[in-house]
Image (cartoon, coloured by chain):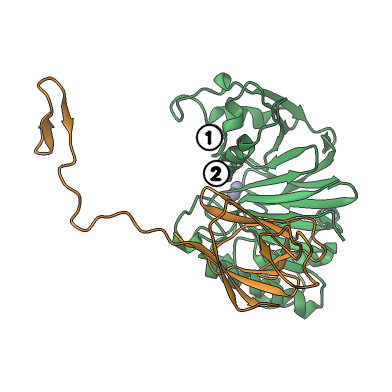
Chain colours: A orange, B green
């Protein structure tokens, strides 16, 4: 049935066509997910996350290097899946604490406190 | 040897998506227990859908071999099943555990009758195998699972899951407060330890992790008596009596925001502290994995 929104594109295929967007509609700009280091050697420091995987550790192979004896050479891995970051323990000596709870892995959420040894991060979700 | 526990759904009763529940999560009950070679799934609430997505990201070549346990067939514990991707693959083997009568198998298939859902249970491509507990014990891969009865409208099962000398108890939809000898005690003397029946305490005894229904605060419970869920403080007392190491409060009330869950956890932790119990308490949260086979 015809309505005011229906246009005839060609003679035999009437389709509903979006004639105009809401006046101020535009795609949102992207904002990076961020880890702010708030304690431990090297703090304060901000890390904007862009890679799909990122190893955090004391060793030279780490992508995000922390100069702390409490941190293992490859301590943890950040992994982006569906634009969310998870952190996972890579068999570290001192583990990962998420808001005080030792976890093996976790999908990170805005405001989470992540502690590796004496290093503390606050995670901020981008968009 | 590996003993991992991942929370996929921690909400009670109905999914609650949205900003108020973003951190703990809005999916209904689903927990994954995993060793290096076995995957167990407890409850098939809406969290099961995302577990399915995750399992299909890196499926083993020989196909998935999964073990499914259901606490009971209330909607929030089965609703994810029709959306569980691995059930549609001919390479998947899904063992569904129940009693000799196989009522779980029938109840899962019932919700897929065609008035409710477009795909029929019999058309699922996976090999779906019913398996019965014998005297409330069953082996599933390299885990041993024991079943125990809980107080809930229509009944529900709790599970004690053991592997490599560690134990995790999954005990949701359980109105502990109706099992108290003096049900007025929490109102008359709220701070007094609430004694639970010995068979229940034994089922939970010395668990490394207890994941328990703690839907209500003491203040909320009086208007919810008989609804089948526990006061968080009563769950704390069960954990203390059983000598549990870690307690995960779950089946969060759909009315509770992330902040409400935080408050519930703090109150529960206060209670454990006053008794002097060495018990770590936290709110079960979607997307979090714990490892039980360390230290
Ligand atoms: Zn429930
Ligand atoms: Zn129920």
Q: Residue at x 63, y 43 (%)?
A: B154
Residue B72 seen: yes
Mark 2 residue element: loop
Decide which of B229, A125 is in the foreground and name it: A125
Q: Is residue A12 above or below residue B53?
A: above
Picture quarter with the C terminus of chain B: bottom right
Residue B151, given in percent of the width and then of the height, sits at 69, 51
Q: Are marks 1 and 2 in contact (CB under 8 Å)?
A: yes
Residue B151 seen: no
Mark 1 residue element: helix
Have a look at marks 1 and 2 and say if they share a chain. yes
Disc 1 to disc 2, C-alpha distance: 8 Å
Residue B267, given in percent of the width and then of the height, sits at 65, 74
Using residue B211 as the reference point, say whether residue B240 is left or right of it: right
| Residue denoted by label 2 | B46
Q: Residue at x 74, y 45 (%)?
A: B33
Residue B50, given in percent of the width and then of the height, sits at 57, 43
| Residue denoted by label 1 | B83
Decide which of B195, A37 is in the foreground and name it: A37
Where, by quadrant of the figure, is residue A111 drawn?
bottom right
Where, by quadrant of the figure, is residue A37 drawn?
bottom right
Q: Residue at x 81, y 72 (%)?
A: A69
């Amino acid at each position: 049935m015809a309505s005011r929104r229906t246009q005839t594109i060609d003679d035999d295929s009437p389709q509903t066509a979006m004639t105009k967007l809401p006046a101020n509609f535009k795609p949102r700009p992207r904002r990076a997910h961020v880890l702010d280091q708030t304690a431990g050697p090297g703090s304060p420091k901000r890390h904007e996350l862009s890679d799909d995987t990122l190893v955090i550790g004391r060793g030279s192979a780490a992508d995000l290097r922390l100069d702390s004896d409490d941190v293992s050479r490859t301590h943890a891995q950040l992994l982006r899946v569906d634009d969310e970051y998870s952190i996972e323990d890579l068999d570290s000596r001192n583990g990962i604490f998420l808001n005080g709870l030792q976890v093996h892995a976790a999908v990170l959420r805005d405001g989470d406190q992540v502690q590796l040894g004496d290093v503390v991060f606050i995670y901020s979700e981008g968009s | 040897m590996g003993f991992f526990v991942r929370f996929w759904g921690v909400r009670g009763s109905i999914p609650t998506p949205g900003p108020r529940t973003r951190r703990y999560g809005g999916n209904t009950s689903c927990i994954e227990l995993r060793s290096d070679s076995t995957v167990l799934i407890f409850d098939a609430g809406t969290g099961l859908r995302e577990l399915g997505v995750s399992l299909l990201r890196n499926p083993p070549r020989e196909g998935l071999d999964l073990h499914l346990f259901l606490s009971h067939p209330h909607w929030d514990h089965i609703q994810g099943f029709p959306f569980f991707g691995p059930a549609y693959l001919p390479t998947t083997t899904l063992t569904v555990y129940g009693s000799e009568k196989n009522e779980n198998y029938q109840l899962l298939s019932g919700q897929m009758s065609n008035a409710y859902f477009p795909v029929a249970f019999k058309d699922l491509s996976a090999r779906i195998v019913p398996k019965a507990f014998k005297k409330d014990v069953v082996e599933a891969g390299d885990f041993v699972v024991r079943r125990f009865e809980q107080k809930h409208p229509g009944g529900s099962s709790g599970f004690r899951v053991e592997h490599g000398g560690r134990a995790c108890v999954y005990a949701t939809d359980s109105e502990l407060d109706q099992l108290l000898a003096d049900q007025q005690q929490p109102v008359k003397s709220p701070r007094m330890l609430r004694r639970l029946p010995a068979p229940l305490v034994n089922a939970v005894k010395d668990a490394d992790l207890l994941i328990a229904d703690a839907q209500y605060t003491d203040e909320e419970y009086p208007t919810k008596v008989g609804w089948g869920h526990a006061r968080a403080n009563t769950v704390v007392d069960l954990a203390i009596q059983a000598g549990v190491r870690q307690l995960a409060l779950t089946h969060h009330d759909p009315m509770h925001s992330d902040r409400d869950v935080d408050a519930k956890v703090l109150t529960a932790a206060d209670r454990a502290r006053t008794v002097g119990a060495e018990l770590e308490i936290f709110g079960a949260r979607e997307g979090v994995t714990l490892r039980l086979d360390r230290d």
